[in-house]
């Protein structure tokens, strides 16, 4: 077998946040299996490759994960250099671990090329430091897709003890806010919704945990990725001089 698979992180959206190694692997690739939200500008690095969409979006049909595993294994066994291109980082809520295990079980040589996760990039670009002396010494990242996944984590976190970042949690924001308040978090705790981070469509809403459930969505945000942040660090966004300057786009905020 001369094939090889690279599990590559495409970053949060801005093509300039792609790593040098990721760009090199794309340029070398014969086949790229890419996710939803990967920009065309990123795919331009794969000029010689066949690019095939295997993305999944909430509420929509997509290629089953097991089928993606088979495509990776079969392409590598055919001698191809394959890039599995995933938004953010492959190992942060991206099923990259499942793909690595499938490749290892099949005996396929592979590597991971880390990417900038939106869990880190979205708050940073909005001027929100996830850790800050005197406010938060740590942070937790959870998926908001399934309550069975996030409820045990939220139940284990002391109210206000760290910054909370939720990916894929826009639709569940009312349920998440209710769960946090039931756990003892103050409704006055600062909160933010960060849309399409690092892209020209980036928008930011800031308010409180008590307002989160009714937070209106910015115009044109349908289908845009959203990152939810809860914690005292959100209040720093107005003072860092970074809020509203994402990719030159004005912030959309409700005070």
Image (spheres, rainbow, N blue to C red):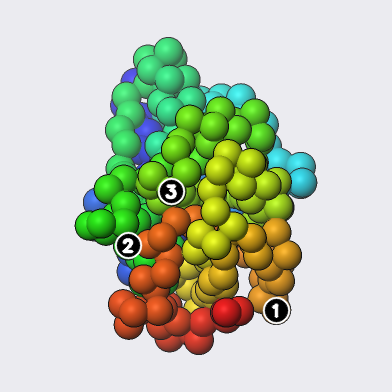
Residue 6 placement: quadrant: top left
Work out how far the residue at label 2 is from the one at label 3, CA to CA, in angstroms.
15 Å
- Front-most of 89 and 111? 89
Give residue 158's position: percent from left, percent from top: 44, 38
Work out how far the residue at label 1 is from the one at label 3, CA to CA, in angstroms.
31 Å
In this picture, is 251 found above or below 39?
Answer: below
In this picture, is 197 found above or below 23?
Answer: below
The residue carrying mark 2 is 129
- Front-most of 126 and 66? 126
In this picture, is 209 found above or below 108?
Answer: below
Q: Residue 219 carries which label?
A: 1
The residue carrying mark 3 is 160
Residue 198 visible within the image: yes
Give residue 149's position: percent from left, percent from top: 59, 31
- Front-most of 175 and 195? 175
- Front-most of 143 and 33? 143
Q: Which of marks 2 and 1 is in front?
A: 2
Q: Is mark 2 on a helix, strand or loop?
A: loop
């Amino acid at each position: 077998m001369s094939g090889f698979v690279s599990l590559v992180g495409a970053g949060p959206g801005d093509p300039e946040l792609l790593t040098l190694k990721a760009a090199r692997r794309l340029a070398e690739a014969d086949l790229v299996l890419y996710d939803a939200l990967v920009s065309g500008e990123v795919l331009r690095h794969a000029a010689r490759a066949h690019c095939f969409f295997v993305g999944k979006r909430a509420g929509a049909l997509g290629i089953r994960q097991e089928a993606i595993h088979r495509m990776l294994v079969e392409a590598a066994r055919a001698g191809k250099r394959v890039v599995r291109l995933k938004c953010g980082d492959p190992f942060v809520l991206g099923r990259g671990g499942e793909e690595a295990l499938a490749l290892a079980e099949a005996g396929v040589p592979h590597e991971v090329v880390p990417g900038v996760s939106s869990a880190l990039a979205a708050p940073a670009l909005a001027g929100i430091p996830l850790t800050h002396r005197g406010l938060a010494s740590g942070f937790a990242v959870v998926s908001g897709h399934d309550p069975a996944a996030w409820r045990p984590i939220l139940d284990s976190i002391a109210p206000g003890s760290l910054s909370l970042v939720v990916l894929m949690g826009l639709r569940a924001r009312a349920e998440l806010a209710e769960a946090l308040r039931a756990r003892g978090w103050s409704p006055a705790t600062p909160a933010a919704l960060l849309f399409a981070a690092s892209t020209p469509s980036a928008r930011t809403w800031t308010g409180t945990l008590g307002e989160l459930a009714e937070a209106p969505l910015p115009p044109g945000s349908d289908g845009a990725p959203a990152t939810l942040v809860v914690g005292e660090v959100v209040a720093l966004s107005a003072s860092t001089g970074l809020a509203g300057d994402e990719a030159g786009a004005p912030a959309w905020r409700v005070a």
